[in-house]
Image (tube, helix red, strand yellow):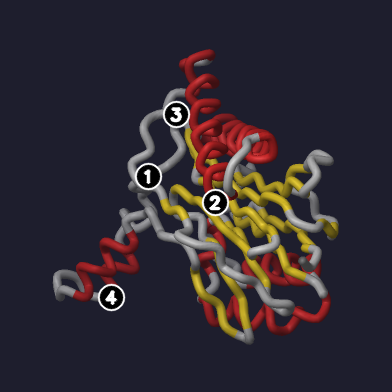
């Protein structure tokens, strides 16, 4: 099995606070660091990214709580990779509920979650919300997980002739979530059906929805340009590309980049 290199990069965008958290727990349980921007090599492990909601305090607390509890349970739970991922998600949701019960002022806080297991068979994942999981392979980018925002519903309405593409793109409901980790029952959950084998040269990117400022083709172009330089270079280049767009309402954008190295 090839080792995996990982790195994190982030921008607050136009906001004055950061509600995203990302982390990687290496195989072997040596612990993890939140939002590390340094490149590290491991023979496998669990990656997680969470995009919090609930304001400055609530959103940041929610995403950190989700990541910490997800990784802790994923590392300790027994069973298949998918069993561990789902158990970790449930634990993260319970942890959010406990935080809210301890402090009612946190009511309404929550987070998206995209978590992935990297190992001998490749990658398996679980996700809730609209944080995308990308695969870069041979110059192209594909989204692996489901989008639990209203965006897919709006695109369906475009296909049915009920909305124009411009109306769907500008609809203020576009980023409303149909499912999130809020401490309550999770309405929608995406789980990989089988492992996806990875190849040397692939990049896997866990991202918050702030990356949507870039079109998939632009993301692929950026990764292609830095693919030979490693995970740190790719992660930083993606965030530079987001910042270069100078979107006046740019959301927090975070990427956790993982690649198999031969």
Callout 4: few (<14), some (14-19), or many (20+) C-alpha neighbours within 10 Å? some
- Using the rendered view, name the quadrant where residue 206 is placed: bottom right
Tag nearer the camera, 1 or 4: 1
The reply to whether callout 3 and callout 2 are in contact (CB within 8 Å) is no
Looking at the image, is 228 positioned above or below residue 47?
below
Mark 4 and mark 3: span between their CA atoms? Answer: 35 Å
Q: Which residue is mark 2?
A: 114
User: Horizontal placement of 146 versus 208: left or right?
Assistant: left
Callout 3: few (<14), some (14-19), or many (20+) C-alpha neighbours within 10 Å? many
User: Horizontal placement of 159 versus 243: left or right?
Assistant: left
What residue is rendered at 80% in x and 55% in y?
A: 37
Q: Which residue is mark 1?
A: 179
First in sequence: mark 2 or mark 1? 2
Q: Position of residue 212 (x, y in %)?
A: 51, 65
First in sequence: mark 1 or mark 4? 4
Q: Secondary structure at mark 1?
A: loop
- Using the rendered view, name the quadrant where residue 255 is placed: bottom right
- Using the rendered view, name the quadrant where residue 152 is placed: bottom left
Tag nearer the camera, 4 or 3: 3
What residue is rendered at 55% in x and 63% in y?
A: 195
Q: Which mark is residue 165?
A: 4
């Amino acid at each position: 099995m090839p080792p995996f290199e990982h790195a994190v990069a982030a921008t607050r965008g136009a906001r004055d606070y950061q509600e995203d958290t990302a982390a990687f727990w290496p195989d072997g349980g040596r612990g993890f660091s939140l939002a590390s921007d340094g490149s590290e090599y491991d023979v496998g492990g669990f990656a997680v990214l969470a995009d919090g909601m609930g304001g400055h305090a609530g959103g940041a607390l929610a995403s950190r709580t989700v990541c910490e509890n997800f990784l802790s349970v994923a590392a300790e739970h027994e069973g298949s990779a998918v069993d561990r991922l789902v158990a970790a998600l449930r634990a993260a949701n319970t942890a959010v509920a406990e935080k809210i019960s301890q402090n009612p002022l946190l009511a309404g806080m929550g987070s998206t979650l995209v978590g992935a297991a990297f190992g001998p068979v490749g990658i398996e994942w679980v996700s809730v919300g609209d944080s995308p999981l990308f695969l870069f392979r041979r110059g192209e980018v594909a989204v692996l997980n489901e989008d639990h925002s209203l965006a897919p519903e709006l695109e369906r309405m475009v296909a049915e002739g009920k909305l124009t593409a411009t109306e769907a793109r500008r609809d203020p409901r576009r980023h409303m979530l149909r499912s999130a980790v809020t401490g309550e029952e999770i309405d929608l959950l995406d789980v990989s059906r089988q492992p996806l084998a990875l190849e040397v040269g692939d990049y896997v990117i866990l991202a918050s929805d702030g990356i949507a400022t870039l079109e998939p083709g632009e993301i692929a172009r950026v990764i292609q340009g830095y693919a030979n330089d490693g995970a740190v270079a790719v992660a930083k280049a993606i965030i530079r590309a987001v910042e270069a767009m100078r979107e006046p309402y740019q959301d927090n954008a975070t990427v956790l980049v993982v690649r198999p190295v031969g």
